[in-house]
Image (cartoon, rainbow, N blue to C red):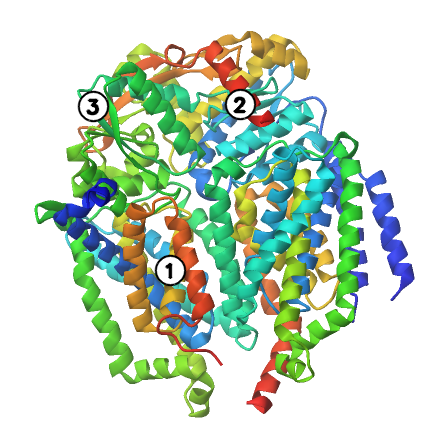
Amino acid sequence: MDLVTSVFPWITNGPLIAVQVMSGLSVAMFLFLVSVGMSLIFGVTRIVNLAHGAFYMVGAYLMVTLVEVLPEHMLSFWIALLVAPLGVAALGGLVEIGLLRRIYHRDPLMQLILTFGLILVIGTLVLLVWGPDNKSVARPDALAGSVRIFGQPFPSYYLLVLALAPVVAIGLWLIFYRTRWGTLIRAATVDRDMLGALGVNVAALYTQVFVFGSWLAGVGGALSAPTVAVALGMDGDVLTTAFVVVVIGGLGSFAGSFISALLVGQLQSFGILIFPAISIVLLFAIMAVVLIVRPWGLLGHPEE
Amino acid sequence: MNVARWVGALAAMIIMPLVLPSFVVVVLTEIAIVALFATAFNLLMGYGGMVSFGHAAYFALGAYAAALVVKRGELPMLLGLAAAPVLAAVGALLFGFFIVRLTHTYFAMLSLAFAQIVFTVVFKWTALTGGDNGILNVWPPLWLKSPRAYCYFTLAVAGSAIVAIHAIVNSPFGYALKAIRDNPRRARFIGVNVRRHQLIAFVLSGAFSGLAGGLFAFFNGSVFPDFAFLNKSFEPLVVALLGGVQSFFGPLAGAFGFKILETVIARQWPMYWPLFLGSVVIVVIILLPQGFVGLVERRRWRSRATGR
Amino acid sequence: MRLGLPRSLTGILVSILGGVILTAEGAAAQPKPIRIGEINSYSGVATVYTFPYKEGLALATKEINEAGGVLGRPLEFIHRDDKLKPDEAVKAARELVLQDKVDFLAGCISSGVGLAISAYAKDAKVLYFATHCQTSRLTWDDGHPYVAHTTNNVNQYVRVAARKASTLPIKKWANISPDYEYGHNMWEEFSTYLKKLKPDVQFVHQSWPKLGESDHSSYITALLQSGAEGLFTSLWGAQSIAFVKQARPFGLFDKMRYVAPSVGNPDELDPLGKEAPVGAIATPFAWYDPGLQKLHPKLEPWTKKWIEWAKARGLKDPQPKLGASWGYASAYIIAEAIKRAKSTDTDKVIAVLSEGFDMEFPWGKVIMRGCDQQALPPQWIGIVKFDAQGKPIATEVEETHGKEVVRSCEEVKELRAAAAAKQKK
């Protein structure tokens, strides 16, 4: 036991572990928001949207502008939080209708490559519109401080995120399992062709899913803006991690993204403390193992 | 096969480095390297029907093999260059074994994951690879140092390699590969060992990519971890797409076009180059008529409709 | 199987055409100006630093040319983008030397790029002035006559920070730095110098997040547990901002004194706003500090001139950032070296550099040291506080000249010998 505590001094510190678990959970929440959008888009349209990280970034930048532009008021932050993702949803709609629709009959890999081209385009556009300087969104006054968890300070903003998590998860669950639209989505992830054969307007469904997925990415970006620096290049890191989450959870699976986000979030948190040297490789190694052993992920559907 | 065309190309390769100014000769060298990389990549994509998003891994393995042999082993450059495709082939065999079991999107994703692992290992294993400082002062020997000399050398090596790949795709192996690409089930029925052919193609593709990496190491004078990063993986893909994946010399033409565009545009407007590149990729994909992959799609879907 | 050869023939023709065009461009360039090929990162994330730096070069160039140029010839910088990639930088360097026939090379922001260009310069026997990048390896471990460094290196400002740190009643130090060459270089310089000045310090914890990490919460947790009283960091830019924002509500800065060289600069303080780490020790360029302005009377008028220039050139943020001063100084130092050599001949300019010289700038004296061709400018320490308007700035600015802390010429010789031995192995 002594060996363990000398290598991991924090392991006997209960309050710290609690704080660590909770912050890991709130990070997982951001990850879930971005990943579930990507997963859904793939599930229905079979496109891996590499531009998802760029959408997240646009959400964060829109948040910066909205907070700057709106008058100083208690509600400004919340209004911005509501409006910013809508901007991203609009962008998603534009992309889907303007570009992706023209190539649906093509190989999904071509569509994937197109989304890679989008990353470059959106990145430069962001630079042109907002400039190269680092930006930041201040946490709203009510949530700028911290609360005490077992005597340890814990950022109040993360509490918000943790409180929102069940709301978002339940909300999404209700949409997917209790509405007709959600049922259509789930059916599409299992068998698109059959759905079309049953007379559903699959093309419209594609657009809706893409817009919805982009909206989720925008929510992730806007919500996480107060916890990071809003800067060029923030899309790369998010994309990589979201990609890993989606693959492990299963492309197209809502529940899979949730579980995987939790797993990856905690793995990253504790991985850094336990295996600092290889923590980066660890994620990709796990992703590779999943792809080798069970390519459709934990809760995904085997293809064809 | 038009002999006149081959002779013409050979003549051009001999004359150009002589008459063109030094800097253009340098660009020509780079075009040759990229053309080799893209042709090797297309062996897998165009002829094998497998799209890899992690080919930079083999390019990087080749580059680092060459650099390490010359700097740590203190062996001559030619040995380093010989080591490049060997290490890359080993990597391709190791990774390819798992990757070819998957298809399509998952194939691409696993290839990407392995490439990221290679990148991270190269980045972190500072003792061996120098980490993000890279390995510097990897120059060719004096008799190959001048831009003209190294250009001839590269044209010779890359040219021979491309000729070799051409021979491969027109051999019985190549025809079996194309058959697999068009319809794996049918190929299996006529007795072709699908997995083995795909793996061999993967290893060959990786080996030639590694050779390109080795050539690049001496061209650049140094190797860095970002040789294994995602951007590098997309380079042969974009180049091949531009030139046309359905023809053998497509990637070669694409290499010319891409490098010239890059040299002219990225110079003048560096801030806008990613915008331009991204737009070109999008436009090419949307307007690319009858892409080879479109051909494959139709055949595959047709067989699915009847085969299911 | 269609060979598509006509397409490739077209490709060959296009390339010849391209070659002719490129040659024509080169031939049309006039031989009169002194041309410096400047390679830096003008796309993507580094632009926050390189845009003001480029305008600093431009302002200095304009002034130099208006005053008659160098040796009666105008100075001209030709810029190329390295896309933050060392191989692109080498390619650009080659192009500048072979095609544009520049007289000298300059530039870099990323240390990897700087080292790569330096290796090429040594091989091609072209003189390279490293400007914005900071690694001490440039002129020390991997130094050679064909490279000169026109701004300070890591060693100088980190040692000044270590000096300040040694005056604090703190024994237990922790480190959080990005896991790459620059981060390791910084920590090594800081910790060894601090230990030398104050032998009873202990280094109780090390954190090495990857470069560009966005979530540091587990590092923060570990730091809170470490028992450290002081925290050194070489995190910079967006990562530094993210770390501060995340660490503050965990009470990290209440527990330990924060030494963060880059955090005192406006590109980090401004976005942080009311979340700035009050009490942090930084090494900023605090042009607004009244004490500094009194010490250097030319600073305030220069600042005014700069702000006008920046606005005219379309910079979104016209404040005189550190990069701006570096660009400005670099151009002048290059010009001075050529002036003193009375020629653009590479060997003559190297001879001048190896003798060394001093130059006066609005912010103090910069010494170009001969033994390693390394610039030694003044260094500043500042403490982060809010001003009367609630904006975070650096205060209590103290100046120490780089020459007082930098490694001696003998130490540099030892470093070079050790590096050479490792190469031979």
When the figure is inspected, residue C39 is found, relative to residue A205, above or below; the finding is above
Left or right: residue A282 compared with residue A261: right
Identity, as a three-letter code, of the amino acid under mark 1: Ala
Q: Are marks 2 and 3 on the same chain?
A: yes
Camera-nearest label, 3 or 1: 3
The crowding category of the residue bearing disc 2, from other C-alpha atoms within 10 Å (few below 14, some 14 to 19, many at least 20), is some
Give the alpha-carbon distance from disc 2 to disc 3, as whole Å. Answer: 32 Å
Left or right: residue B287 compared with residue C50: right
Residue C209 x %, y %:
35, 42
Element type where label 3 sits in the image: loop
The crowding category of the residue bearing disc 1, from other C-alpha atoms within 10 Å (few below 14, some 14 to 19, many at least 20), is many
Residue A97 x %, y %:
47, 72
Left or right: residue B172 compared with residue A276: right
Mark 3, residue position: C171
Label for residue A242? 1
Chain under disc 3: C
Chain under disc 2: C
When the figure is inspected, residue B289 is found, relative to residue B259, above or below; the finding is below
Chain under disc 1: A
Direction right: furthest residue: B4
Mark 2, residue position: C419
Identity, as a three-letter code, of the amino acid under mark 2: Ala
Q: Say whether disc 2 or disc 3 marks the residue closer to the N-terminus.
A: 3
Return the residue nearer the eye: A131 or A151.
Answer: A151
Image point 39% across, 33% down: which residue?
C183
